[in-house]
Amino acid sequence: MKYFSTGFNLCRKFSIFVVQSGQQMEDTYRHKGLRRLLVEELVQKGITDEKVLEAIGKVLRHAFIRDSALIRFAYQDQAFPIGAGQTISQPYTVAFQTQLLQVKSFDKILEIGTGSGYQAAVLCELGARVYTIERQRELHVKAQQLLEKMGYKMHFYYGDGYAGLPAYAPFDRILVTAGAADIPDTLVRQLKTGGRMVIPVGNNGQQEMILIEKTSETETVITQHGAFAFVPFLRGKT
Ligand code: SAH
């Protein structure tokens, strides 16, 4: 047994099988060491939330890198291509968005932009109930297969994230992992009062990280949290 996690986890049914189901998912001492270094790097870069750091320290990022030539760089603080013109987010960005979201155990979270599934796994490690949507069928199918194989339990949807998931609303938290031109009203409506939504907003590959706190049914407090670069939040599905 090379990978073992202790403690209750709502999202992960098993972890020991991870090493038994494929080379790419084997968690060696080298991987563990690299993950510890990544966590230290995130601390140096200003991430302070212990629970977020712990979650990043648990997720086998190397299993989410598709290109075998890039797997050895999996624990560098970088974004990588995952096919279909998309990327797995940079660990710092994942940590920053997750920290801003202030996730609590059992929170019902809507993630828009499943992509590789890495961010969704981090949310699961925090004990959240995760609903994730992807607009590209190929990525949706691959992420679902991988996360299920890794033992993560969550809800996967293929569709346009602009519409959210009205049937499952309201959500405690909403996280958008693609750069939006503006804040979609539909999504704010699906946020619980007292809930938090994190979304990068801006054009031309440069966005400002925006936090929306819903203080009442009709009121929100909006704050800015620095510049980031995301792939675009696009309408429709492919
Ligand atoms: N959270 C991902 C990041 C992927 S990049 C990860 O951890 O790997 C952003 C993703 O958002 C891409 O996969 C892109 O296809 C998806 N996306 C863009 N617009 C979308 C939309 N309207 N609905 C759902 N997903 C969308």
Image (cartoon, rainbow, N blue to C red):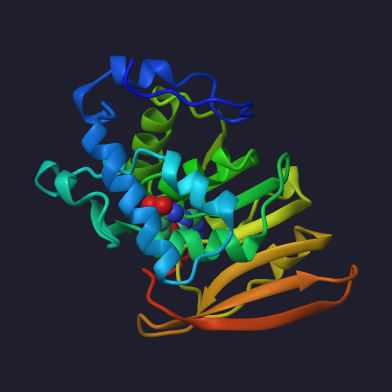
Residue 206 location, x and y as percent? Answer: 39, 83
Left or right: residue 109 compared with residue 55: right
Residue 33 location, x and y as percent? Answer: 28, 42
Closer to us: 145 or 18: 18
Considering every residue shown, the one lying at the far left of the view is 69
What residue is rendered at 60% in x and 27% in y? 7
Ligand 1 positioned in quadrant: bottom left
What residue is rendered at 24% in x and 30% in y? 28
Residue 194 location, x and y as percent? Answer: 84, 62
Q: Is residue 237 visible?
A: no
What residue is rendered at 55% in x and 39% in y? 125
Closer to us: 77 or 175: 77
User: In the picture shown, does residue 131 fall above or below 172?
Assistant: above
What residue is rendered at 90% in x and 70% in y? 216
In which quadrant is the N terminus drawn? top left
Left or right: residue 77 compared with residue 13: left
Tell me how many marks there are: 0
Closer to us: 225 or 52: 52
